Image: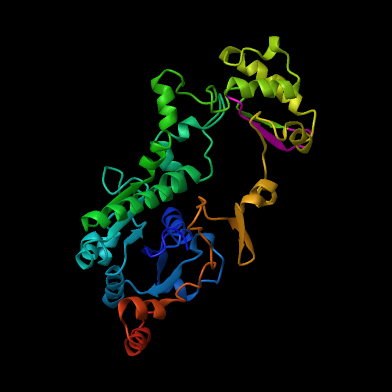
Amino acid sequence: MGPLSGIRIIELEGLGPAPFAGMMFADMGAEVISITRKSAAADAPVANIISERGKKSIALNLKDPRGVEAVLKLCESADALIEGFRPGVAERLGIGPEQCLARNPKLVFGRMTGWGQTGPMAQAAGHDINYISLSGALHAMGRAGDKPVPPANLVGDFGGGGMFLAFGVVSAILEASRSGKGQVVDTSMVEGSAALMHMVYCFYNQNLWKDERGVNLLDTGAHFYETYETSDAKHVSIGPIEPQFYHILKEKLGLDEDSFGAQMDTSRWPELKQKLTAIFLTKTRDQWCEVFEGSDACFAPILSMTEAPKHPHNVARKSFIEVGGQIQPGPAPKFSRTEPQVLKGAPRPGSDTESVLSELAGYDAASLASLRAEGVLS
């Protein structure tokens, strides 16, 4: 049983960060009920969508007042509801914060958008790449003299989005347990990704970070915080920032003190990077692993998505798991007592409609049959 066992979350179906937050809740043992639109459920394939693992799925026609009423009934026994619509959409459907908290004053209403619920850009369309542009995060990513490089959609959607939504909702649930009052959690990917930049801003405010790419300590400016190609066209990473770790790197590579001694002399970083580039090209990635294995040189092979689940460290910690025949990242973090477990993969959309509405919202068999016949349920 995970640490959130006994918590009930209603998730209004969406894409990206909100379902990811729902997955985090389910991984931690919460009961997560994902509400999909009836029209979307009808032709949906049965697929192991990772973000839906461990959840229950019900399908409702939210354009029908009876479908809306079913959502409101479920809110009465829920700890939180999360949604990722544009501002105002939930209100127009009749399941906004005012309507839901009227049924359950202790409910936490978690909202996930790119720009936030308010502000001049609140109603504009956008994606991860746009949100991390506005926060300053994307500007900091890339090599010297080159354009910014998006880090997939990890920083906006998931780091600055879904994780902050989950943290905000859990925080509000804890507060509601003391005050007896729910509230709205307004999660913005712009603000979440800005928060992830806190260390960079700390360095910047101390004049230790230039507002340009690829010339700083942590953005590939330094020769000792970089990725390097190996002779087999694979790659490794090094990051020995501390002097004692940098000393080990020099020992392992046989670097002389005269050439590589001035670690923090930024004027020499480009030259030393060229020298390390040539050195790492002399061996394969696995040969470099043999050189550095067990040392504190802050070294790691750069693994592909196929390789990462097979690495001995990841295997030992069960960092990846198999669900429904598919390899995927496991629940994180680890707990000493209330160990999270993924008990099932993604449900078929709408597969739990009748059982959930019967058990949690008080619908009897006749009512469910009538609602299905009249197109409210799939």
Above or below for 332 versus 221: below
Q: In the rendered image, is residue 138 in sight?
A: yes
* Outermost front residue: 337
Residue stretch rendered in magenta on the structure: 230-241
- Counting from the top left corner in percent of width and height, residue 92 is at 25, 63
Place of residue 165 in the rendered image (x, y in percent of width and height, measured from the top left): 37, 51
Q: Quadrant of the C terminus?
A: bottom left
Q: Position of residue 78 (x, y in %)?
A: 31, 66
Most extreme residue toward the top is: 258
Residue visible at 34% across and 53% down in the picture: 169
Residue 253 falls left or right of residue 105: right
Would you place residue 252 above or below residue 45 in this image? Answer: above
Which corner quadrant of the image does residue 215 belong to? top right
Residue 205 in which image quadrant: top left
Image vertical order of residue 176 relative to residue 376, above or below: above
Is 235 contained in the magenta span?
Answer: yes
The reply, left or right, for residue 139 in relation to residue 180 is: right
User: Is 361 or 91 nearer to us in this picture?
Assistant: 361
Any magenta on residue 303? no
**Horizontal side of residue 249 vs 101, given as left or right:** right
Task: Tell me which residue sits at (54%, 36%) in the image.
Answer: 149
Viewer-proximal residue among 83 and 25:
25
Q: Which SS type dominates the magenta stretch?
A: loop
Estimate the x, y position of residue 278 in percent, counting from the top left.
75, 23
Labels in figure, total: 0
- Residue with the most extreme bottom position: 366
Q: Residue at x 61, y 67 (%)?
A: 324
Q: How is the image coloured?
A: rainbow
Q: Is residue 378 visible?
A: no
